[in-house]
Image: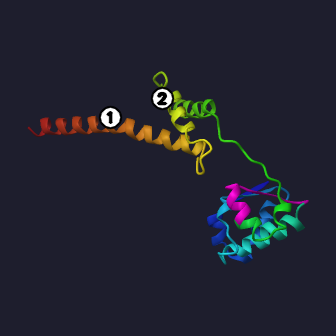
Amino acid sequence: KAAGICRTKLLEMDPKDIPDLLDSAMGGVLFIDEAHNLDPAKDAKGKPAVTQILIEAAENKRTELTIMIAGYKDEIEKKLYGFDVGLKSRFRDVELDDFTQPVLQEIFEKMAADKHWKLEDNVALVAARRLARRRGIKGFGNARDVRSLFERVVVEGAEPRIEREHKAKKKMARKIAA
């Protein structure tokens, strides 16, 4: 059993609905993405989420519920752990390394295979090298960045074909009209 929510939706929740969110994850995991953007000291909307979920539930429901927060470590430490010094003791840090170049390449190749594309030699390797340059930089999105690059390749690859088809249709229409 699991429930997931991003910071934006959490902040939009009415505080009285937070217990329902907790109940939906009870016996499992509540995953809060973009937790680095929760700033209870400066944002009144974030305060109920942090106090009811991260402080109260993490302590009082710790045997029934696992709460995972994801985000930039420095901002979580400053905004969340700085808001309540006891909060840090309720969580165990797990740092995930960015994907390596071979893994980024593998993801790119899988996306191409899923679209039934045959890549020219070294295309995935070059894409992975470009992506790997951003490893370790704040904001690097691993598979999200691979998907973004792949989608740009799809669009840019499709544009010339679409343009050729459009010109062919116009030419055919002129022939029919003539």
Residue at 65 percent of width and 38 percent of height: 99
Q: Is residue 141 above or below residue 35?
A: above
Observer-nearest residue: 26 or 57?
57
Q: In the image, what residue occupies the spot 48% across and 27% down?
A: 123
Question: Disc 2 or 1, which lies upstream in sequence?
Answer: 2
Res 157 quadrant in image: top left
Q: Quadrant of residue 171?
A: top left
Circle 1 residues within 10 Å: few <14, some 14–19, many ≥20: few
Amino acid under label 2? Trp
Task: Classify residue 71 by image quadrant.
Answer: bottom right
| Residue 64 counted in the magenta span | yes
Residue 38 position in % (x across, y down): 67, 67
Question: Is residue 116 part of the magenta span, yes or no?
Answer: no
User: Would you say residue 123 is visible in this rendering?
Assistant: yes
Circle 1 SS class? helix
Residue 91 lies, in percent from the top left, at 82, 58
Say which amino acid is labelled 1. Answer: Arg
Q: In the picture provided, is 137 more to the left or to the right than 69?
A: left
Q: Which mark is residue 161?
A: 1
Q: Which residue is mark 2?
A: 117
